[in-house]
Image: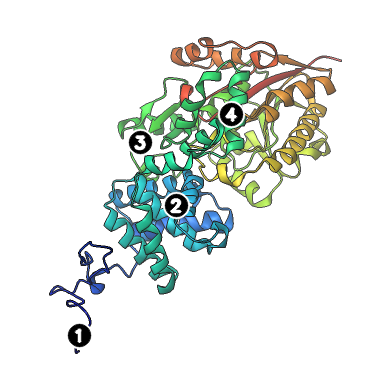
């Protein structure tokens, strides 16, 4: 090919690398890779992350359910699985802040970008600003991913945007974005939480006497989540305990809060003994703690227990195992048929004489014609207490959802009160610390239902706790009023989800 005489030098060097246009008085430079060497196919670990992130944004899927399947599908080794996990969760966690940064680097609105392109950009930005990935690799591999999964056209756009992003470190971008922001907005950008969530968490912390803990809580929400394990009690030949001991031998650390639980950081739990037969399973220690607390006060043989919102079955499985030990029965209620099937599978490891599953709206539980001695309402909620494990929830939930959920929560409380035996116990639990979903719900139901009395929820939780757990419940601020009789767990203090627990009792007629 004849070289254009108007060019001052060859377009490519002797290794095939293309020369950049340069700028001003800067000499022209050659690209780091020849076209033949640039990524045109997706790296398997990045592809697993991309498919997970797109499923979350397109289908409202949950990353903790999608990513393990993508890792298995790609047959990733431990190192690449770790990379895909960090990339996926980090991208979802900081998506809102990354969108602001991307918005500074494009000439259109974020909403005008095709969703897959935006997802790819977020993945690239996370690699550039928050991982140990080399800038060139982050840009090149992301562009290769786009070419492979979306098309050649968007590849150039993604390349240009990521190069602009790479011009500054994360802290410089945050300083630029928060230059004129108010304190709440600054925290929202810096810690990647929507501003309305920051305000809600601040209010809840103040209510529980921890007004100075806001940044600590936001930081805890952004920490990589630990895997909490539970060994189901009372299975044949102490199978749950044996499985938990085996997990400890494999590197899990026994919980300092309660018995029967452990923290695991060793990777794929599917390789642990007891997981396949259901003796060992994943469950946040906070969830285990409140389930044990409901079952702690003296149990009478023949009691009937109810898990009113049982799907997907984690707390129900633990309650069923405890019910089998105490020779009582549990009814697990779940309105969605596919989730009711999950509940049945979750309870399958427990003697089937100890439990049953009902598929139906919890608000119609009176149709069973049976009263219950202990009822758990693990109420549908905003999930603001589980942002470590479900980072996408912070961007998915909106204030408008709160109004719908609080109405449902109050209706479930009333339905449960209708079928609660005199002197029976009703546990109201949410994986959210939001004031409207927690303390306010309890205050409202006490006004509507004078037959209900609020007990001290900390008492049974202390009874089932180990010394360290008892200390955490006893030490620290002791709020007054309704909040003082409930328990609010926190990620930055207890290492659990921000689980709320209130215990009500029905007075004799």
Q: Quadrant of residue 256?
A: top left
- Residue 404 lies, in percent from the top left, at 74, 41
Give the structural element (helix, strand or loop) at label 4: helix
Q: Residues within 10 Å of mark 1 (few under 14, many from 20)?
A: few
- Residue 280 lies, in percent from the top left, at 45, 36
Residue nearest the observer in this picture, 139 or 266: 139
Say whether marks 3 and 1 touch (CB < 8 Å): no
Q: Looking at the image, is mark 4 or mark 2 earlier in the sequence?
A: 2
Q: How is the image coloured?
A: rainbow
User: Where 116 falls versus 213 (above or below)?
Assistant: below
- Residue 275 lies, in percent from the top left, at 43, 41
Q: Is residue 402 visible?
A: yes
Q: Looking at the image, is mark 1 or mark 2 earlier in the sequence?
A: 1
Give the labeled residue for mark 2. Answer: 67
Give the side of residue 407 with respect to residue 93, left or right.
right
Give the structural element (helix, strand or loop) at label 3: loop
Q: Separation of disc 2 and disc 3 at Cα?
A: 17 Å
Give the labeled residue for mark 3. Answer: 265
Q: Which mark is residue 30?
A: none
Give the side of residue 165 with respect to residue 232, left or right.
left
Q: Which mark is residue 201?
A: 4
User: Where 177 falls versus 136 (above or below)?
Assistant: above
Give the labeled residue for mark 1. Answer: 5
């Amino acid at each position: 090919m004849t070289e254009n005489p108007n060019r001052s030098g060859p377009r490519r060097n002797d290794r095939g690398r293309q020369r950049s246009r340069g700028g001003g008085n800067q000499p022209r430079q050659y690209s780091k890779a020849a076209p033949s060497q640039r990524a045109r196919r997706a790296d398997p670990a990045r592809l697993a992350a991309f498919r997970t992130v797109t499923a979350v944004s397109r289908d409202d899927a949950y990353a903790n359910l999608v990513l393990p399947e993508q890792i298995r599908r790609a047959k990733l080794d431990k190192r690449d699985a770790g990379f895909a996990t960090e990339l996926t969760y980090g991208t979802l966690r900081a998506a809102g802040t990354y969108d602001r940064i991307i918005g500074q680097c494009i000439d259109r609105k974020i909403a005008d970008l095709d969703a897959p392109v935006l997802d790819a950009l977020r993945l690239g930005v996370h690699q550039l600003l928050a991982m140990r990935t080399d800038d060139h690799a982050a840009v090149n591999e992301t562009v290769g991913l786009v070419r492979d999964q979306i098309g050649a056209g968007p590849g150039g756009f993604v390349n240009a945007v990521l190069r602009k992003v790479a011009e500054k470190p994360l802290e410089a971008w945050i300083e630029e974005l928060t230059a004129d922001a108010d304190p709440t907005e600054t925290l929202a950008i810096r810690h990647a939480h929507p501003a309305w969530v920051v305000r809600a968490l601040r209010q809840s912390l103040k209510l529980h006497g921890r007004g100075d803990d806001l940044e600590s809580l936001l930081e805890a929400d952004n920490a990589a989540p630990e895997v909490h394990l539970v060994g189901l009690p009372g299975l044949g030949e102490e199978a749950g305990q044996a499985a938990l001991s085996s997990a400890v031998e494999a590197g899990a650390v026994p919980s300092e809060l309660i018995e029967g639980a452990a923290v695991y950081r060793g990777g794929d739990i599917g390789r642990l003994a007891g997981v396949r037969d259901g003796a060992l399973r994943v469950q946040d220690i906070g969830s285990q703690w409140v389930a044990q607390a409901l079952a702690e006060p003296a149990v009478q043989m023949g009691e009937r227990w109810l898990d009113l919102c049982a799907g997907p079955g984690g707390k129900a499985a633990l309650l069923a195992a405890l019910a089998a030990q105490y020779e009582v029965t549990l009814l697990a209620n779940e309105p969605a048929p596919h989730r009711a099937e999950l509940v049945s599978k979750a309870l399958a490891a427990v003697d089937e004489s100890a439990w049953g599953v009902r598929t139906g709206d919890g608000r119609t539980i009176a149709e069973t014609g049976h009263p219950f001695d202990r009822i758990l309402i693990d109420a549908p909620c905003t999930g603001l207490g589980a942002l470590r494990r479900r980072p996408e929830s912070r961007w998915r939930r909106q204030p408008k959802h709160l109004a719908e959920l609080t109405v449902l929560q109050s209706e479930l409380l009333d339905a449960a009160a209708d079928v609660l035996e005199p002197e029976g116990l009703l546990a109201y639990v949410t994986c959210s610390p939001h004031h409207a979903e927690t303390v306010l719900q309890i205050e409202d139901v006490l006004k509507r239902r004078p037959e209900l009395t609020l007990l001290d929820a900390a008492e049974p939780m202390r009874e089932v706790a180990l010394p360290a757990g008892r200390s955490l419940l006893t030490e620290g601020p002791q709020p007054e009023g309704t909040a003082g009789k409930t328990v609010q767990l926190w990620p930055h203090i207890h290492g659990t989800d921000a689980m709320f627990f209130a215990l009500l009792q029905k007075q004799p007629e």
